[in-house]
Amino acid sequence: MNKLFFLFVLLSCCGLALGQSKDLTLDPGVKAHAGIDAVYAKFSRAYRELDHELVGGLYSPNASYLVPDQNILIGRDKITPTFKSFFDQVRSQNGKLEINFRIVQRRVAGDLGYDVGVYTLSQIDSAGKKGTGQGKFVVVAIKDGGQWRFQVDGYSDLPKPE
């Protein structure tokens, strides 16, 4: 009987971990969504690989990108170069990037959804020193051509811990 209970507890814990990864964590009550969660996985991979084309392709052709202290960028063709510039700068310093996401609120209905969350961005320099910052974000995702993509992406920094 104890072995059966232990197996039940183990399987229950594994079930809770589904939809969770080092790239994406869902707060309690936030339901996994295979299509949208896949966008975050690709986004994190693009940062690790410094692949601006991959990350740019995660936005719809007419997406809006709301970067702090800048004008709104509309269109994948205007968004992708911002990632290229950033990734090129990191690459020129022999650095690496890691980004992960925590979703605190999500709503999906049909081909439209939104997430509110926190991102953690780490930059590792050529000596292996890691600098980490956090920010908050909101994205609106749409199903575009059979794939989920970001239609609106806005973010800003969180206060630094004291």
Image (tube, rainbow, N blue to C red):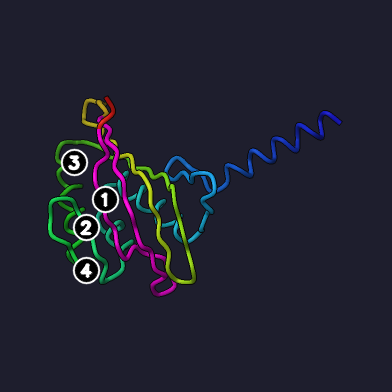
For image coordinates 82% across by 35% down, the residue present is 4
Instruction: Check disc 1 and report its element: helix, strand or loop.
Output: strand
Q: Position of residue 54 (x, y in %)?
A: 31, 57
Q: Taking 32 as reference, is 95 above or below it?
A: above
Q: Nearer the viewer, mark 4 or mark 3?
A: 4
Q: Quadrant of the N terminus?
A: top right
Q: Nearer the viewer, mark 1 or mark 3?
A: 1
The residue carrying mark 3 is 90
Q: Does the magenta stretch include residue 18?
A: no
Q: Is the magenta stretch mostly helix, strand or loop?
A: strand
**Magenta residues, start to end:** 131-159
The residue carrying mark 1 is 155
Q: Nearer the viewer, mark 4 or mark 2?
A: 2
Give the class, few, some or many, for how many residues have Cα within 10 Å of label 2's Cα (few <14, many ≥20): many
Q: Which of marks 3 and 2 is in front?
A: 2
The residue carrying mark 2 is 66
Q: Looking at the picture, which amino acid does disc 2 mark?
A: Leu
Q: How far apart are marks 1 and 2 (CA)?
A: 7 Å
> First in sequence: mark 1 or mark 2?
2
> First in sequence: mark 1 or mark 3?
3
Instruction: Check disc 3 and report its element: helix, strand or loop.
Output: helix
Q: Which disc number belongs to residue 35?
A: none
Q: Distance between the residues labelled 4 and 1?
A: 17 Å
Q: Which disc number belongs to residue 75?
A: 4
Q: Looking at the picture, which amino acid does disc 3 mark?
A: Val
Task: Name the foreground residue: 44 vs 73.
Answer: 73
Q: Is residue 145 magenta?
A: yes
> First in sequence: mark 4 or mark 3?
4
> First in sequence: mark 4 or mark 1?
4
Give the class, few, some or many, for how many residues have Cα within 10 Å of label 4's Cα (few <14, many ≥20): some
Marks 1 and 2 in Cβ contact (< 8 Å)? yes
> First in sequence: mark 3 or mark 2?
2
